[in-house]
Image (tube, rainbow, N blue to C red):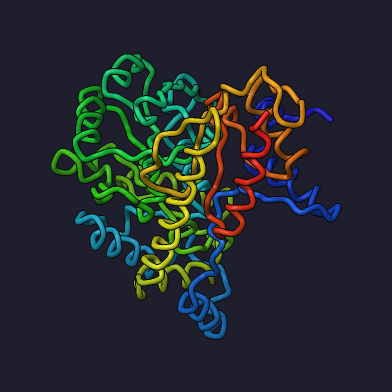
């Protein structure tokens, strides 16, 4: 079968592929400690579930406007103002089938052949693929472990060329957990404003912050920069709603209209019941978010302690999200405890899965060879057993 060039060049999501390998071993009856997916292990809070049931009983099971129901758009705008002090209008919002779909809408509506999208590395696995599907070119800007995997203004300035149109910035970062101080963000914003770059700020982890400084949304910088800013967010991470598939964009009205038009031709509306549940998530009690953050904070502390005790491993502290992204390259070319020799992080993850039954994601998938990603969105007992096995493999 001859497929289109765009789809033929497309690789499966590395995180989903890694999780599939772990599931295959589990299906054989093998106990696998799976730290691949960025998915909270908590159930969706009860009041959100109740809102979904009430919506179904009230008959909200039909088509909605393609870009989302007005009540949800209003709730998103109100919640954003509550959390960040900046007011968007409902006509600047498109509700989509998860934040990944929102990113697709942004990149496809704004970029095409000849356009360049700037992506700091390490980056979330789907960014590069979404850019290439739109026919644009991804330009990767490396960052370093020593910098905490933060993009510097100088590196951004050097990367900007005549075809640069959009910067994709994810803070807190998946996979590194890197966050930026307000001063660091302001310095980057001065560069993007100087060059009139669009900025897509992926803020899906905005409520999962461990640093003393609160989260700062990109649009609030420099006294407010909404003209070339797109905010992407959703309910998957903060509200434990990964399966409900609701994300959204906040953007200038003309771009919002274009994204709504695109979505109307591709998927139509997001799930009607999930939209009503999201209203309850954003407008209802927020204690559930604080409770989950408290538990993630404990898991982060445990993860940091265990990573620091792993031989030959290094990692900057994650300021947000729920990932540990650590450097295992010192073990390449040397025998592990089982005698196996790995030359890169993909081989390391394979050895770890096959011999220790621990599933991580290779840093190669995130544009960072030599590193691996561990999600600590799981219980402490699972983390303890997994780290014991990782430590055992590294004792070679």
How far from the left and from the top, in percent, is residue 274? 52, 68
What residue appears at the point 64 percent right and 52 percent down from the top-left corner?
A: 385
Q: Quadrant of residue 297?
A: bottom left
Q: Is 186 located above or below residue 55 in the figure?
A: above
How far from the left and from the top, in percent, is residue 60? 53, 77
- Viewer can see residue 207: yes
Name the side, left or right, on which 93 lies relative to 21. left
Q: Is 22 located above or below residue 39 in the figure?
A: above
Name the side, left or right, on which 243 lies relative to 297. right
Q: Quadrant of the N terminus?
A: top right
Nearest the viewer among 131 and 308 is: 308
How far from the left and from the top, in percent, is residue 227? 24, 39
What residue appears at the point 41 percent right and 70 percent down from the top-left corner?
A: 288
Q: Is 121 located above or below residue 305 in the figure?
A: above
Q: Looking at this rendering, what residue extends furthest in the left direction?
A: 223
- Viewer can see residue 95: no
Q: Quadrant of residue 6?
A: top right
Q: Quadrant of the C terminus?
A: top right
Nearest the viewer among 274 and 365 is: 365
Q: Quadrant of residue 141?
A: top left
Nearest the viewer among 279 and 329 is: 329
Q: Is 84 located above or below residue 47 in the figure?
A: above
Nearest the viewer among 33 and 109 is: 33
How far from the left and from the top, in percent, is residue 198? 32, 32
């Amino acid at each position: 079968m001859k497929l289109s060039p765009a789809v033929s060049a497309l690789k499966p999501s590395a995180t989903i592929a890694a999780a599939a390998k772990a599931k295959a071993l589990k299906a054989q009856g093998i106990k696998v400690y799976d730290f691949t997916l960025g998915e909270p292990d908590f159930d969706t809070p009860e009041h959100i579930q109740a809102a979904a049931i009430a919506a179904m009983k009230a008959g909200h099971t039909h088509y909605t406007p393609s870009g989302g129901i007005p009540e949800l758009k209003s709730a998103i705008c109100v919640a954003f103002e509550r959390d960040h002090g900046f007011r968007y209008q409902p006509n600047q919002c498109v509700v989509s089938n998860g934040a990944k779909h929102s990113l697709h809408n942004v990149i496809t509506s704004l970029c095409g052949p000849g356009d360049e999208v700037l992506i700091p590395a390490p980056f979330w696995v789907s960014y590069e693929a979404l850019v290439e599907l739109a026919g644009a070119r991804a330009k990767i800007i490396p960052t370093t472990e020593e910098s905490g995997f933060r993009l510097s203004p100088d590196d951004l300035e050097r990367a900007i060329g005549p075809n640069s149109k959009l910067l994709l910035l994810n803070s807190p970062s998946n996979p590194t957990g890197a966050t930026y101080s307000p001063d660091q963000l302001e310095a980057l914003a001065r560069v993007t404003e100087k060059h009139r770059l669009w900025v897509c700020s992926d803020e899906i982890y905005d409520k999962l912050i461990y640093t003393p400084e609160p989260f700062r949304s990109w649009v609030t910088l420099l006294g407010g920069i909404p003209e070339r800013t797109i905010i992407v967010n959703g309910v998957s991470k903060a509200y434990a709603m990964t399966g409900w598939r609701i994300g959204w964009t906040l953007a200038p009205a003309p771009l919002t209209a274009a994204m709504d038009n695109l979505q109307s031709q591709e998927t139509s509306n997001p799930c009607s019941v999930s939209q009503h549940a999201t209203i309850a998530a954003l407008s209802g009690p927020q204690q559930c978010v604080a409770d989950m953050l408290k538990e993630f904070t404990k898991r982060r502390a445990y993860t940091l302690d265990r990573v620091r005790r792993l031989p030959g491993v290094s990692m900057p502290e994650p300021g947000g999200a729920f990932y540990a992204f650590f450097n295992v390259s010192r073990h390449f070319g040397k025998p592990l405890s089982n005698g196996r020799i790995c030359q890169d992080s993909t081989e390391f993850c394979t050895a770890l899965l096959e011999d220790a039954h621990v599933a991580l994601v290779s840093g190669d998938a995130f544009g960072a060879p030599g590193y691996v990603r561990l999600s600590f969105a799981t219980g402490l007992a699972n983390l303890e057993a997994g780290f014991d096995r990782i430590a055992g493999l590294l004792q070679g």
